[in-house]
């Protein structure tokens, strides 16, 4: 490497070998799978992370990407190849790729057209990432959402200030308040005169201190009926231990007149 000064600016001059090493370092970041593929799907280049993922020889580039793509996604990727050839526009897609442990991973890839000197598209650059954990988390969240929406217990999620952000269908059915009427309002709308202020101050103090409250509470529906419920209120904390929300679950015990 040498330095060249031009108009007060020092310009770094790299040898071809240094440039190659820099490019290899950039291309071999652990979180990126980078490859160059011909229009038939044959690998012409794979970076080191992709080579390890597929458990292939880094210099062995005669395999096809379609050998590792799940059968349900092969046609999707083939259509992307055709689309790039026809338009030259980059395209993105999610697909399943078989790793060296014979497990299919969820991959999100972006496909770019590579042109020759005559401006003809002859190769495809593919930059992809493993999104399996992200997809698993999405599935887990969807499962929990279904469970919460179908439970007979009333579920309410509020901010740390007590402003409602979520209520489930059981809450709507028991209280008479719809989701639209509840979101953005404070939970105090359900507080009845059956429990004194001291009781609520103690509950609020306990959960704001990071503790979980569990006990019987008497609340009031939209039409003025009182009902007792077995309630649990738990704080939700972020990774730093700071309270961000409260989640309340209630099981109705008795409707009172």
Image: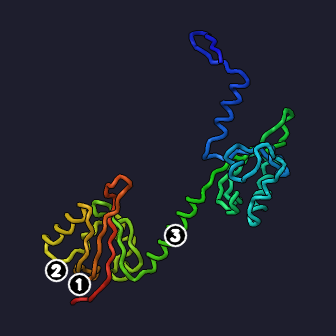
In the displayed structure, would residue 134 be above or below residue 29? below
Q: Earlier in the sequence, mark 1 or mark 2?
A: 2
Dot 3: few (<14), some (14–19), or many (≥20) neighbours within 10 Å?
few
For the residues bearing labels 1 and 3, Cβ distance under 8 angstroms: no
Element type where label 3 sits in the image:
helix
Q: How many marks?
A: 3
Q: Label 1 vs label 3: CA separation?
A: 33 Å
Q: Is residue 21 left or right of residue 38?
A: left
What's the residue at 76%, 54% (across, down)?
A: 80
Element type where label 1 sits in the image:
strand
> Considering depth in this image, is 96 or 155 the residue closer to the camera?
96
Q: Which residue is mark 3?
A: 142
Q: Quadrant of residue 218?
A: bottom left
In the displayed structure, would residue 229 be above or below residue 156? below
Q: Quadrant of residue 74?
A: bottom right
Q: Which residue is mark 1?
A: 226
For the residues bearing labels 1 and 2, Cβ distance under 8 angstroms: yes
Q: Label 1 vs label 2: CA separation?
A: 9 Å
What's the residue at 23%, 78% (across, down)?
A: 215
> Considering depth in this image, is 220 or 162 the residue closer to the camera?
162
Residue 194: x %, y % from top left: 16, 80
Q: Which residue is mark 2?
A: 194
């Amino acid at each position: 490497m040498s330095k060249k000064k031009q108009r007060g600016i020092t310009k770094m001059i790299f040898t071809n070998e240094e440039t190659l090493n820099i490019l290899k370092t950039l291309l071999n970041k652990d979180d990126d799978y980078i490859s160059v593929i011909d229009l038939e799907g044959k690998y012409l280049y794979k970076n080191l992370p992709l080579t390890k993922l597929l458990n292939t020889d880094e210099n062995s580039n005669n395999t096809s990407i379609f050998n590792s793509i799940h059968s349900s996604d092969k046609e999707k990727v083939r259509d992307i190849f055709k689309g790039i050839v026809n338009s030259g526009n980059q395209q993105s897609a999610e697909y399943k790729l078989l790793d060296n442990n014979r497990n299919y991973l969820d991959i999100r890839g972006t496909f770019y057209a590579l042109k020759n000197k005559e401006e003809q598209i002859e190769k495809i650059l593919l930059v992809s990432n493993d999104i399996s954990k992200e997809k698993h988390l999405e599935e887990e969240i969807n499962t929990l959402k279904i469970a919460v929406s179908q439970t007979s217990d009333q579920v309410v999620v509020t901010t740390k200030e007590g402003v409602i952000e979520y209520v489930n269908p059981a809450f709507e059915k028991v209280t008479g308040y719809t989701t639209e009427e509840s979101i953005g309002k404070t939970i105090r709308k359900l507080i009845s005169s059956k429990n004194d202020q001291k009781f609520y101050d103690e509950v609020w103090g306990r959960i704001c201190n990071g503790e979980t409250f569990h006990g019987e509470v008497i609340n009031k529906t939209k039409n003025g009926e009182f009902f007792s419920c077995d309630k649990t209120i738990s704080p939700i904390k972020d990774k730093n231990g700071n309270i961000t929300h409260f989640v309340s679950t209630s099981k109705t015990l008795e409707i009172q007149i």
